[in-house]
Amino acid sequence: MYIHLGNEMVVNEKDIVGIFDLETTTISKHSRKFLEIAEKQKQVINVSYELPKSFILTSKNKENKVYISQISTATLQKRSKIL
């Protein structure tokens, strides 16, 4: 099953490692560092240029991607059957 992340972007549900709330996770210096490293490695994909609410970490064929989405974690989790 695929999950819609916003603006015509979908990912395969089985590739999702985690769905994280940007407001609460970026309080941690470890989360900020993770996102900074992902950005430098060109692994970050902005789904929308609206106010971001969540980020979704995916892994497929040992390649990680971080999707920044304007959709809340609660809404994304409702769209998923396995999370």
Image (tube, rainbow, N blue to C red):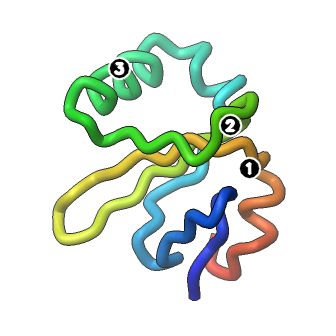
Q: For mark 2, what is the residue?
A: 21
Inspect the image, locate mark 3, and give the three-letter code of the amino acid beneath it: Glu
* Tag 3–tag 2 contact (CB < 8 Å): no
Task: Measure how far apart labels 1 and 3 are at the Cα level.
Answer: 20 Å
- In the picture, the quarter occupied by the C terminus is bottom right
Q: Position of residue 29 (x, y in %)?
A: 45, 11
In the rendered image, the vertical position of residue 53 relative to residue 18, given as above or below:
above
Q: For mark 3, what is the residue?
A: 36
Q: Which mark is residue 15?
A: none
Q: Position of residue 30 (x, y in %)?
A: 41, 19
Q: Earlier in the sequence, mark 2 or mark 1?
A: 2
Q: Determine whether, in the image, residue 15 is placed left or right of residue 68.
A: left
Q: Residue at x 24, y 24 (%)?
A: 40
Q: Position of residue 65 (x, y in %)?
A: 35, 50
Looking at this view, name the residue that lies furthest to the bottom. Answer: 1
Task: Please state which of the two labelled residues, at mark 3 or mark 2, is closer to the viewer.
Answer: 3
Q: For mark 1, what is the residue?
A: 73
* Tag 2–tag 1 contact (CB < 8 Å): yes
Task: Measure how far apart labels 3 and 2 are at the Cα level.
Answer: 16 Å
Inspect the image, locate mark 1, and give the three-letter code of the amino acid beneath it: Thr
